[in-house]
Image (cartoon, rainbow, N blue to C red):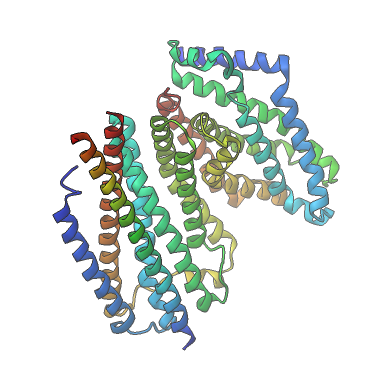
Amino acid sequence: MKLLRQTLLLLRKDLLLELRRHESLMTMFFFGALLLFVFNFSFELTPARVSELAPGLLWLAFLFTGTLGLTQLFEGERGNHCLDALLMSPIDRGALFLAKTCFNIVLMGLVELVVMPLFWILFSLPSWQPLPALFLIVFLGNVGFCVLGTILAAVTLKARARELLLPLVLFPLMVPVILATIRCMEALLRFGELGDALPWLRLLIGFDVIFLTVGILIFDWVVDV
Amino acid sequence: MPQVTGKKRKGILGAATLVFIIAGLYWGLVKAPPDAYQGDSQRIMYLHIPSILTAYLSFFLVFLGSCLYLWKREKRDDSLAHAAAEIGVLFTALTIIEGSIWGRPTWGVWWTWDARLTLTAILLLIFIGYLMLRALVEDESRAASSAAILGIIGFLDIPLIHMSVYWWRTLHQPPSILRPDKVPWENIHPELLTALAINFVAFVLLYFYLLSHRLRLSEMREEIKSRRMN
Amino acid sequence: MVMWGYVILAYGIVWGAILLYTLSLKRRCRAAENELQRLGARKES
């Protein structure tokens, strides 16, 4: 499929660039870890309370770290009119969208893979068992965040006060994802299974699918010069 | 759409609006009896329910204008979206204030994170984000396209936001907090319904009255800009 | 009754805000009209 091939091509380019320069990834890692330290001083995280607060705290950390990553998203294309060149090439805009989204998903996924176990260690959570399932839920939330975030990052590209505007427009729209992932994570931590939280998972997956589709269709108009 | 913004039509619309507003005030404050449970604070509902409906109408018009603009690239569709957003912010903010004031005698607090107030607050944030995006993007046509994208995405997200906030509040709150959310429609006094209906018409007329003036303002500004360039 | 206090507060804020917005809108329209007339007159002269 042409779309897939173009996507992979663009994705490979971004991943290679990131591997060489480590700009975004390193900043995101350290920012995520730093937030965990700040949480320690901001909240009384006794072993009793930490399981309750873990989903919310983790999501706060990922939201802010993710926003950092988003503002960097088109940095690579800024100089030398790279973005214009990309847009003038016969590449499908949908592929550009998918590539940028996947790139961000990968970055955030890597950060989550490190920050979540770090959280478990720093705050001495009792059981490591729910971690894989938790990671899956966080990943689904990650997808939702990156999909909407990529569209809005592209839309705010030429705006003043861009770093402030992006979270301002993104966060209210993220409410379903935030609520759904946290409810699922709570259920996993408390009961070890989703149970009653299953509708939330469906909502999350629905959100991801809907906006992934919308993104592919709408990206033609997004980066219109 | 020169006819919509024609002076005579606006005059009639304005007069009709005024008539319904006055009728609504009379019915709402004088004629309708106080509610059995809520007392006179029920009268705030005559403002609150029409307000929230006009807020959602606003967002729909933002969505409509955004879609049309991306499709046809006509300035007037972008103006529609912009005007609807501006007036929408006003009515959404008022909805929140009305809801908060109503909540004070009913629940004893100025704010509560119940589904309705939370949803309206989120709607306000989305509207504000939309207007800020328009204000902060330098190039005009890019501002219009960017805003249109945001308008469409925002509108598509609203049902999902609705679902998630309502689930959040109904699955995790004890029933005692739920009850104030439910309006007992079954045994509602016909006078109350009349008051609500009149105020509803008043608000919708008012909305379109303000919208038509705001659209005319946009038109005139466009004309000024083109005359300045010649 | 205390209830009426809240009702008056709500109605006052709502209609006050709507009135202010309407007046602001009318003022902006008038300014734009004057500017249009000024530019129209200038073109003809």
Query: Where C11 sits versus B93, above or below?
Result: below
Tell me the residue at 31%/83% (across/down): B30
Residue A58 is left or right of residue A4, and the answer is right
Q: Quadrant of the C terminus of chain A?
A: top left
Q: Is residue B172 at least partly visible in the picture?
A: yes
Q: Residue furthest front?
A: C45
Q: Nearer the viewer, residue A138 or A171?
A: A171
Q: Residue B224, how many percent across, how many down? A: 29, 38
Res B198 quadrant in image: bottom left
Outermost residue, bottom direction? C1
Q: Quadrant of the N terminus of chain A?
A: top left
The correct choice, above or below, for B7 with respect to A92 in the image is below
Compared to residue A6, the image places residue B217 above or below, namely: below
Q: Residue at x 41, y 29 (%)?
A: A218
* Left or right position of B8 against C14: left
Q: Nearer the viewer, residue B58 or B141?
A: B141
Closest to the observer, B168 or B108:
B108
